Image (cartoon, rainbow, N blue to C red):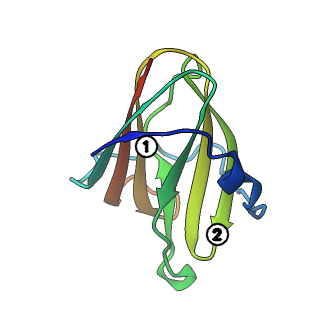
């Protein structure tokens, strides 16, 4: 699926601040199972919003960034909960191709139960 994204500033402005907790020394996310892959085509200076499906709090499952994202291409500027969903907004700062992959893990463990991947092509 190829999307041409314009400004998502209006959507980003509606985001409600979320509590972001990270644990130092958490193990990296292990191999990702097959999951949703979205291809995005955009240009420098725009914003990209990554939507991660919500999970019930009692499940103990959390979305974690599975692989490092090049800060020469994308910079995370916001992470918020909207209802049960998690929205992460990145600013596009450089050209190239970048993969943004998230794994759904039980707390800060390695095993990923689901994955969501965005392949970003920046012109």
Q: On the image, which quarter does residue 74 sit in?
A: top right
Counting residues from the N terminus, which is met first, the one under dot 1 or under dot 2?
A: 1
Q: Which residue is mark 2?
A: 82
Give the structural element (helix, strand or loop) at label 2. Answer: strand
x 66%, y 44%: residue: 24
Give the structural element (helix, strand or loop) at label 1. Answer: loop
The x, y position of residue 20, in whole percent, is: 71, 56
Q: CA distance from mark 1 to mark 2?
A: 21 Å
**Mark on residue 9?**
none
The x, y position of residue 75, in whole percent, is: 63, 30
Q: Which residue is mark 1?
A: 66
x 64%, y 69%: residue: 82
Q: On the image, which quarter does residue 118 sit in?
A: top left
The x, y position of residue 38, in whole percent, is: 33, 46
Drawn side of residue 45 relative to residue 19, left or right: left
Which marked residue is nearer to the observer: mark 1 or mark 2?
A: 2
Please tell me which residue lies in front, 27 or 63.
Answer: 63
Please tell me which residue lies in front, 44 or 81.
Answer: 44
- Up-down relation of residue 95 to residue 61 (above or below): above
- Up-down relation of residue 47 to residue 92 (above or below): below
Residue ranking furthest to the left = 34
Please tell me which residue lies in front, 61 or 39.
Answer: 39
Point out the image quarter for the C terminus. top left
Residue ranking furthest to the bottom = 58
x 75%, y 62%: residue: 19
């Amino acid at each position: 699926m190829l999307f041409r994204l314009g400004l998502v500033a209006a959507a980003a402005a509606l985001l409600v601040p979320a509590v972001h907790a990270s644990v130092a020394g958490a193990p990296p996310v292990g191999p990702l199972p097959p999951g949703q892959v979205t291809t995005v085509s955009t240009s420098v200076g725009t914003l990209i919003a990554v939507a991660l499906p919500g999970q019930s709090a009692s499940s103990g499952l959390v979305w974690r960034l599975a692989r490092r994202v090049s800060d020469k291409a994308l910079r995370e500027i916001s992470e918020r909960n909207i209802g049960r969903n998690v929205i992460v907004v990145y600013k596009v700062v450089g050209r190239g191709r970048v993969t943004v992959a998230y794994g759904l893990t039980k707390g800060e463990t390695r095993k990923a139960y689901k994955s969501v991947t965005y392949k970003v092509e920046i012109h």
